[in-house]
Image (tube, grey):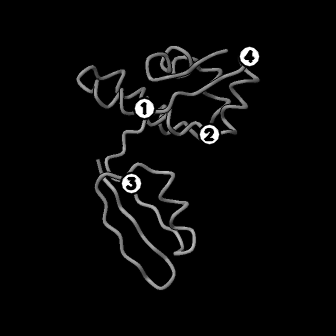
Amino acid sequence: MLKINLVNIEDTILKNKDLRQKLPELMPYVDIWEFAVRNPSLKGLRKQAALDYLNALGEKQIDVLIDYFNCPVTIDKLDNQVVRNFQSTVENLEEELKKFQLKNMVCYREGTQVYISSWK
């Protein structure tokens, strides 16, 4: 099993041109990453582009990775969002709130829709 995370994404995917071309929808992240690689002063941008690439990998892209590597692939995504927004109906609100660990939040309601913003 291949486990892709922030530590190995550069060596596993971003430096592999053949694999990158099989995922054209993620090329904007690669372009930013390549720009940051060529400019050493942009090390933070390089890490952010790699993190964004990692978090953008979905089921379709994971299937491409499985076909490419011929083994099961898991993705360790990082939650780097400070603020999270979601909405729900009044009837489903309790079920939606159980999915999240909310420490700080604000909510408002318009008719049957409830909008919640939470932050770390």
Q: Earlier in the sequence, mark 4 or mark 1?
A: 1
Circle 3: residue type: Arg
Q: CA distance from mark 1 to mark 3?
A: 17 Å
- Disc number lying in front (4 or 3): 3
Q: CA distance from mark 2 to mark 3?
A: 19 Å
Q: Neighbour class for label 3 at 10 Å: few (<14), some, many (≥20)? A: few
Circle 2: residue type: Gly
Q: CA distance from mark 4 to mark 3?
A: 34 Å
Locate residue 73, reporting x and y percent.
66, 22
Closest to the observer: 104 or 70?
104
Closest to the observer: 52 or 34?
52
Q: Circles 1 and 2: CB distance less than 8 Å? A: no
Q: Which mark is residue 84?
A: 3
Locate residue 94, reporting x and y percent.
51, 64
The residue carrying mark 4 is 71
Q: Earlier in the sequence, mark 2 or mark 3?
A: 2
Q: CA distance from mark 2 to mark 4?
A: 17 Å
Closest to the observer: 72 or 109?
109
The residue carrying mark 2 is 58
- Disc number lying in front (2 or 3): 3
Q: How many marks?
A: 4
Locate residue 27, reporting x and y percent.
54, 36
Circle 1: residue type: Leu
Q: CA distance from mark 1 to mark 2?
A: 14 Å
Q: 13 above or below 29? A: above
The residue carrying mark 1 is 51
